[in-house]
Image (cartoon, rainbow, N blue to C red):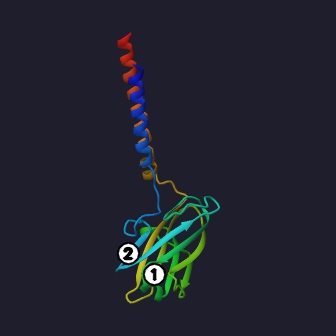
Amino acid sequence: MIRQMIRIWTLVIALSTVFYTGVANAHGKVSLESDVCVRNMAGSMVHLSTYQPQHDPEAEYCTEIPQQGETFWVVDLVDQALRNMPIVIQIVRGSGENISETVTSLYSTNHSDGVIKGEFNLDEGDYTMLITGEGVPPLRYEYPLRVQMVNYADTLRTAVPYMIVLLLLALFTNQFLKWRRVQQ
């Protein structure tokens, strides 16, 4: 009986460990082709990173910004061709078809190192960052930004492994109690 309980709990712990490591949602150390923060147009690529050091000094975000307030952003112009053309960066309120007013904009002509930096202070809501390379033809990249908004799909994906472990614990406990009743 004790051995069976040890086996059951070992299995439960092993399964919960497997599910827990599957919850990791990291941004860094992925190839450019797999990075969700990279936009590719006509062979030219840009990469966006956002930071909120006042909340978490080590965290890097892409389009899901966890808190409203001061946010630093960095646009990496991956391709050399983009580094030689003027770049316009706009942040507008709304996303998709619901784009309204321009919150802030930046015009950059000197970015030979391929990096354009800035900061913005946004309230809760949906925004879009538009990056336009003024070449021939012009290149336009869009990043939808969600500031301090709950993403229910991600929340559900995070919660599912824990719910499965809880259900397995309930099942194993139920089976053990039935087995114990039969033994008595």
Q: Quadrant of the N terminus?
A: top left
User: How far apart are the two marked residues, 2 and 1, measured between alpha carbons?
Assistant: 12 Å
* Left or right: where 74 falls relative to 2: right
Q: Give how far across and how far down residue 19 sits, in percent.
A: 41, 44
Left or right: 50 as drawn, with respect to 180:
right
Residue furthest right as drawn: 54
* Of 49 and 98, the residue lying toward us: 49
Is residue 167 something that shows in the picture?
Answer: no
Q: Which residue is tagged 2?
A: 40
State the image coordinates of residue 65 (x, y, percent, origin top left): 54, 61
Q: Position of residue 11 (x, y in %)?
A: 39, 34
The kind of residue on which mark 1 rests is Thr
Q: Which residue is mark 1?
A: 132
The residue mark sitting in front, 2 or 1, is 2
* Upstream in sequence: badge 2 or badge 1: 2
Q: Residue at x 40, y 85 (%)?
A: 138
Residue under the point 47% across and 61% down: 27
Determine whether 159 is above or below 148 in the image.
Answer: above
